[in-house]
Image (cartoon, rainbow, N blue to C red):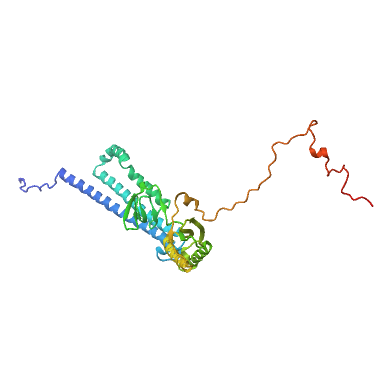
Amino acid sequence: MSILPSTTAPPPDWSWGWWGNLAVVAGVKLAAIVGIIVGAILLSWLLRLVIHRVVRRIVAGAKSKANVDDTRAIDASPLAQVRLVQRTRTLGTILQNIVNIALAIVALLMIVNVIDQSVLGSFALLSAAIGAGLGFGAQNIVKDVLNGIFIVAEDQVGIGDVVDLGLATGIVEYVSVRITHVRDVNGTLWYVRNGEITRIGNMSQGWSRVIIDLAVAADSDVNQVEKAMLHAAKDLAKDPKWRTRIIEQPEVWGLESVSGDALVIRLVMKTRAGSKDDVARELRMRLKHAIDALGLTLPQLNSITLTGLDGAQRVRGANPPKTHPTPITPEKPLWKPKRTANTTPPLTEALGDSSDDSGPDTTKEPRS
């Protein structure tokens, strides 16, 4: 039996050779890149969730200690709770930005490593050149970031504070790693770089002082005017609506200046930091009514902000420190003459001293 060659053709070779290998490698790398991106997004979402949860727990704890439900209502609670809420929210925002930037850089390096591993080896030389360029070109950015972190960590500013940054004055609406957003009284939003901030005046921490200069006619009775002013200020401090905003009892610092037309009397009152303007408006109104009741006219009624040397001297208030009088001791003579044998005796010795016991006693009465 003869074996005939088979007439059936072999199955075609559908493999693409190196094209197929390239497609497989490209698919694997593409899947790895997609996995890195998805992993970075999920990790960012998870860390953001953790940060938000921590911030919410700290804020909720501060609210529970203050026994309030609204964050704005914490203004009536101790200042430490308010600062804790503001600092926590600001640090949470900065931490989110740092996490996002760090994850983006790590994900980018991993993607480059997946595409070509030799790139990272040559990236060391490239990074040295880039670092040298950034050292000159991006030094302001690094300065902004570091200064912003220290500003928030040291509790210099917080969201909602009324601040004077020198470059802008207003309410802090947002603090980022590099820029602080400040909105002024006219509604203008200022973007201030943190690296350009050299001084910060925070008007929302601690306490404030209302200083009002009241001018009356030159022929007015100063004592009567001072009593009326102090009585009106004390009534304001006792008012249930305003007493929670006033820290100490008002003081009359006395006659501030004298001119031919008016006498200026200064009144001060220490208030909470966020209540200075409201208390000042109400106090001016009550002073106006008190002076009208005396039948006097008001040439001026101004609010004063002490600055410079005058402000430094008045930090402690109107009461000067108590001092004791310095005792005066009689001075001793620096030189006392010495009697010698050749010295002429004084005139009293030559004439005789009446107080000497050796002399005759002329004061005794003769015996009868």
State the residue lying farthest toward the right. 368
Using the rendered image of the protein, determine whether residue 252 is visible from the camera's viewpoint.
yes
| Depth check, front residue: 184 or 340 | 340
- Say left or right for 20 vs 5: right
> Residue 159 location in percent, x, y?
38, 56
Give the residue displayed 39% in from the left and 53% down from the top. 164
In depth, the one of 159 and 212 nearer the eye is 212
Q: Residue at x 24, y 44 (%)?
A: 115
| In the displayed structure image, the side of residue 58 where residue 97 appears, left or right | left
**Across the whole image, how many numbered discs are drawn on residues?**
0
Residue 242 place in picture, x, y as percent: 46, 66
x and y percent of residue 240 in the render?
Answer: 47, 69
| Left or right: 164 in relation to 309 | left
**Nearer the observer, 186 or 229:** 229
Please report the residue visible at 66 percent of the width from the left and 47 percent of the height from the top.
328
Specify the quadrant of the image occupied by residue 297: bottom left
Looking at the image, residue 332 sits to the left or right of residue 179; the answer is right
Q: Is residue 63 visible?
A: no
Residue 368 picture location, percent across and down: 95, 52
Tell me if residue 63 comes above or below residue 6 in the rendering: below
